[in-house]
Image (spheres, rainbow, N blue to C red):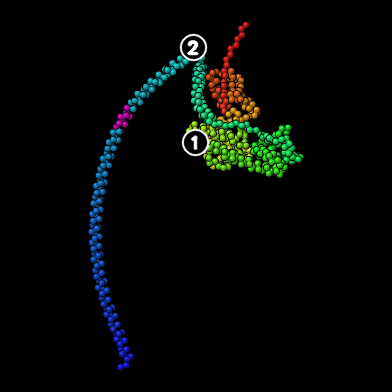
């Protein structure tokens, strides 16, 4: 046979063998799977039976526990109900006892009320009898005294009023005297200690400055050809130059101290330099203005350093330096502020307060004066706005607002600043007043006292620091004098503004005159 036939036979045999093998394996696998599934189902049935048995047992146990718990709960409730019933019975017994007691008390009150009614009737009868007796007594008294009851009442009231008035005056005088002695003693200690420890110069400022010249020929050079130099200088500085017969001197007149200082410095520089002409004058005035600005800054820093206050805003320090060129009644504003700061610190130390805060408030109390001629408003309003703008302490702001009494002080430090400001202003030589202001205050003082009933005449003496009131002795008694002095003092405080204090001296003089013939 050919080879390809053998090959075909061989392939056919292999295919038949593979098919038979596949059938055998498939049959085996099906049998094996069927046996495995059967055993798994048996196991599943066993597990389910066990679970059912276990659940049944748990259910029976739970039912038993629930029954036992319900039995215990029922027993507890029965016990609690019994206790509540017993307690309610006790309350009922108590209430019954209280009701019995209340009934007994009501009976007793009824008996007492009946007794009181009987007594009230008896009292009413007695009152009627007393009233009749009083009427008879009044009629008899009126007949004996010759006065009606109203007249007698007025007479008694007048006697009592006079006695009370006298006793009140005596009491007021004693209390005032005692309080004044203690307050004066304490205040005198504080003020004297503060003033003794504060040494401040008092220089009366004026509205003119004098520049010394090396010779009288310099006057002509200052005036210049056809007066051009003096006109330029006056125009640039805003100050009047007075060149008269005064030997070797030129007077600078102006109400603005800063301009006057600029003019003084510029003129002194021009005199030293010798070159005096309009261009040179403009250059020198500009330099003098810068020098004065630097001087203001340095003066402010020196004042802060002298007082020992730190942390003040640089703009406030510059404004403090500007106050060197401001005056109040001739008193230098910066020197006054430094003195008030030192006095405030000393008074605060005597009273155990914050010394640094008191110094700060005293130093800044008049800060508004540095700009009050440039801006609208009083120096108190401007000072308060400046302190608020630069985040100053609330105590300092209140001290600035209240140091003249425009606002109520909210702290002891504000009151201290008020006192220190008054001390500094009222010290002899610190300030000067115009004759018109002085005479007006004296006249107002005498007018206030003359308006009181019973005043004969009054005299303001000691530069207005004392007023002597002469009263008519027939109209004003000794007791009335005490009340009158107090009323005059209160009216002066309400209607006048003055530094320090005014002494009210009420004088009552009785004179008896006769003639020998």
Q: Vertical placement of 152 versus 31: above or below? A: above
Give left or right: position of 332 versus 350: right
Q: Position of residue 369 (x, y in %)?
A: 60, 37
Q: Residue at x 24, y 47 (%)?
A: 75
Q: Neighbour class for label 2 at 10 Å: few (<14), some, many (≥20)?
A: few
Near-viewer residue (104 or 48): 48
Question: N-terminal of the two: label 2 or label 1?
Answer: 2
Residue 280 inside the magenta-drawn segment: no
Depicted 11 relative to depicted 27: above or below: below
Closer to the camera in the image, 352 or 145: 352
Q: Is residue 190 above or below residue 389?
A: above
Residue at the far right: name it: 226
Label 2 to label 1, Cα distance in Å?
Answer: 75 Å
Viewport quadrant of the C terminus? top right
Q: Position of residue 48 (x, y in %)?
A: 25, 64
For the point 34% across and 27% down, the residue is 109
Q: Quadrant of the N terminus?
A: bottom left
The rendered magenta stretch, by its main secondary structure, is classed as helix
Residues packed near mark 1 inside 10 Å, few (<14), some (14 to 19) or many (20 plus): few
The residue where tag 2 is placed is: 144
Residue 36: image quadrant is: bottom left
Query: Which stretch did the figure color magenta?
Result: 100-108
Question: Is label 2 in a helix, a strand or a loop?
Answer: helix
* Residue assigned mark 1: 354
SS for callout 1: loop
Q: Is residue 425 visible?
A: yes
């Amino acid at each position: 046979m050919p080879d390809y036939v053998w090959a075909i036979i061989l392939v056919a045999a292999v295919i038949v063998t593979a098919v038979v093998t596949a059938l055998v394996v498939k049959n085996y696998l099906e049998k094996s799977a069927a046996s495995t599934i059967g055993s798994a189902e048996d196991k599943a049935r066993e597990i389910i039976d066990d679970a059912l048995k276990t659940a049944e047992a748990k259910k029976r146990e739970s039912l038993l526990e629930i029954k036992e718990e319900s039995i215990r709960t029922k027993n507890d409730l029965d016990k609690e109900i019994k206790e509540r019933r017993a307690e309610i019975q006790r309350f009922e017994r108590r209430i019954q006892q209280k009701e019995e007691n209340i009934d007994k008390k009501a009976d007793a009150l009824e008996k007492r009320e009946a007794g009181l009614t009987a007594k009230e009737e008896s009292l009413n009868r007695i009152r009627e009898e007393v009233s009749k007796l009083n009427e008879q007594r009044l009629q008899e008294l009126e007949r004996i005294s010759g006065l009606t009851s109203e007249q007698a009442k007025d007479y008694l009231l007048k006697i009592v009023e006079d006695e009370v008035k006298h006793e009140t005056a005596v009491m007021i005088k004693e209390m005032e005297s005692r309080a004044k002695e203690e307050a004066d003693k304490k205040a005198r200690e504080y003020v004297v200690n503060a003033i003794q420890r504060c040494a401040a110069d008092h220089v009366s400022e004026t509205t003119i400055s004098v520049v010394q010249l090396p010779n009288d020929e310099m006057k002509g050079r200052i005036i210049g050809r056809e007066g051009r130099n003096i006109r330029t200088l006056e125009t640039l500085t805003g100050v009047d130059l007075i060149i008269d017969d005064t030997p070797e001197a030129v007077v600078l007149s102006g109400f603005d101290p800063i301009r006057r200082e600029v003019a003084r410095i510029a003129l002194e520089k021009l005199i030293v330099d010798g070159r005096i002409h309009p261009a040179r004058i403009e250059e020198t005035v500009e330099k003098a203005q810068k020098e004065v600005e630097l001087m203001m800054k340095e003066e402010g820093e020196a004042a802060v350093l002298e007082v020992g206050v730190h942390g003040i805003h640089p703009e406030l320090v510059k404004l403090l330096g500007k106050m060197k060129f401001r005056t109040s009644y001739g008193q230098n504003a910066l020197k006054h502020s430094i003195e008030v700061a030192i006095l405030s610190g000393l008074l605060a130390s005597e009273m155990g307060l914050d010394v640094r805060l008191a110094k700060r408030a005293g130093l800044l109390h008049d800060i508004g004066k540095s700009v009050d001629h440039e801006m609208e408003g009083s120096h108190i309003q401007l000072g308060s706005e400046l302190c608020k703008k630069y985040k100053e302490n609330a105590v300092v702001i209140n001290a600035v607002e209240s140091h003249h009494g425009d606002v109520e002080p909210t702290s002891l430090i504000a009151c201290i600043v008020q006192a220190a400001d008054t001390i500094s202003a009222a010290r002899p030589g610190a300030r000067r007043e115009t004759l018109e202001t002085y005479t007006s205050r004296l006249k107002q003082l005498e007018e206030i006292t003359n308006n009181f009933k019973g005043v004969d005449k009054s005299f303001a003496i000691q530069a207005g620091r004392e007023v002597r009131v002469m009263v008519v002795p027939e109209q004003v008694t000794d007791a009335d004098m005490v009340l009158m002095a107090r009323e005059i003092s209160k009216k002066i405080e309400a209607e006048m503004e003055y530094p320090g204090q005014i002494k009210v001296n009420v004088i009552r003089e009785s004179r008896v005159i006769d003639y020998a013939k």
